[in-house]
Image (spheres, rainbow, N blue to C red):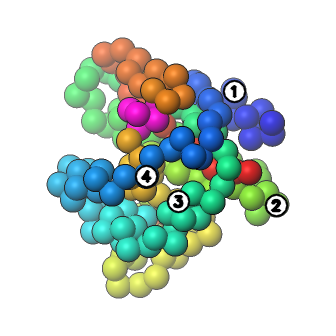
């Protein structure tokens, strides 16, 4: 499959599953509301903006399959926040490159790791999203529990003390 073929050398693991096995839970949003990542109420692709956009959630639910991908990156130590953010940014770049590569010729939608980072400063809430066709939310922002997702797909969520593992997903038919 072409998505898998494109991604297989760029990520650490990838598994295909069915969208019907993915749980989108409103419950997870309460963790976003605790604002531990500092992005709550700061982005069009995060809660609470996402909570009100049921249309967006239904868009993902309407696909048949999901290619779940993960990337393991080394950290200097378990508290290496800079290393975590650098690894996340590198992982998101793989997704942006994926979008550039496949463009709009194919029907797919992405869910990434962490808040949308396309613009230096998001336009939320004063102005519309600058890149609605490129921006994509995180798995968590749509209420997907990443640990459960990893279990469902038999992928490793924890890959050792001095590592961080990010997950993303390509929804397609
Ligand atoms: S593309 Fe820019 S404006 Fe749109 S959600 Fe992402 S950061 Fe915000």
Residue 105: give its label.
2
- Callout 3–callout 4 Cβ contact below 8 Å: no
| Cα distance in 3D space between marks 2 and 4 | 27 Å
| Cα distance in 3D space between marks 3 and 2 | 17 Å
Identify the residue shown where x is 38% and y is 74%.
Answer: 52
Which residue matches tag 3?
136
Identify the residue shown where x is 59% and y is 52%.
Answer: 110
Nearer to us of marks 1 and 3 is: 3
Nearer to us of marks 3 and 4 is: 4
Identify the residue shown where x is 35% and y is 85%.
Answer: 126
- Callout 2–callout 4 Cβ contact below 8 Å: no
Q: Quadrant of residue 38?
A: bottom left
Nearer to us of marks 1 and 2 is: 2
Residue 9: give its label.
1
Residue 170 seen in this snapshot: no
Secondary structure category for the residue under label 4: loop
Nearer to us of marks 2 and 4 is: 4
- Callout 1–callout 2 Cβ contact below 8 Å: no
> Is residue 85 within the magenta segment?
no
Secondary structure category for the residue under label 3: loop
Secondary structure category for the residue under label 1: loop
Task: Tell whether 84 sits left or right of 16.
Answer: left
Q: Quadrant of residue 44?
A: bottom left
Which residue matches tag 4?
24
Residue 9 seen in this snapshot: yes
Nearer to us of marks 1 and 4 is: 4
Q: Nearer the viewer, residue 89 or 113?
A: 113
| Cα distance in 3D space between marks 1 and 3 | 22 Å
Helix, strand or loop: magenta stretch: helix
Residue farthest along the bottom direction in this orientation: 126
Q: Decide which of tag 3 and tag 2 comes sooner along the chain.
A: 2
């Amino acid at each position: 499959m072409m998505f898998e073929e494109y991604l297989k050398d760029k990520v650490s693991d990838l598994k295909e599953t069915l969208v019907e096995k993915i749980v989108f839970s409103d419950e997870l949003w309460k963790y976003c509301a605790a604002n531990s990542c500092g992005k709550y109420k700061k982005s069009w692709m995060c809660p609470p903006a996402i909570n009100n956009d049921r249309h967006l959630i239904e868009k993902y639910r309407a696909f048949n399959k999901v290619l779940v991908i993960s990337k393991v990156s080394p950290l200097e130590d378990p508290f290496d926040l800079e290393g975590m953010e650098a690894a996340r940014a590198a992982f998101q770049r793989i997704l942006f490159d994926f979008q550039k590569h496949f463009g709009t010729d194919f029907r797919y939608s992405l869910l990434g790791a962490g808040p949308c980072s396309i613009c230096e400063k998001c336009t939320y809430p004063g102005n519309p999203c600058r890149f609605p066709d490129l921006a994509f939310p995180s798995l968590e922002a749509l209420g997907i529990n990443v640990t459960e997702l990893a279990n469902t797909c038999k992928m490793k969520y924890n890959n050792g003390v001095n590592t961080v593992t990010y997950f993303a997903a390509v929804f397609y038919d």
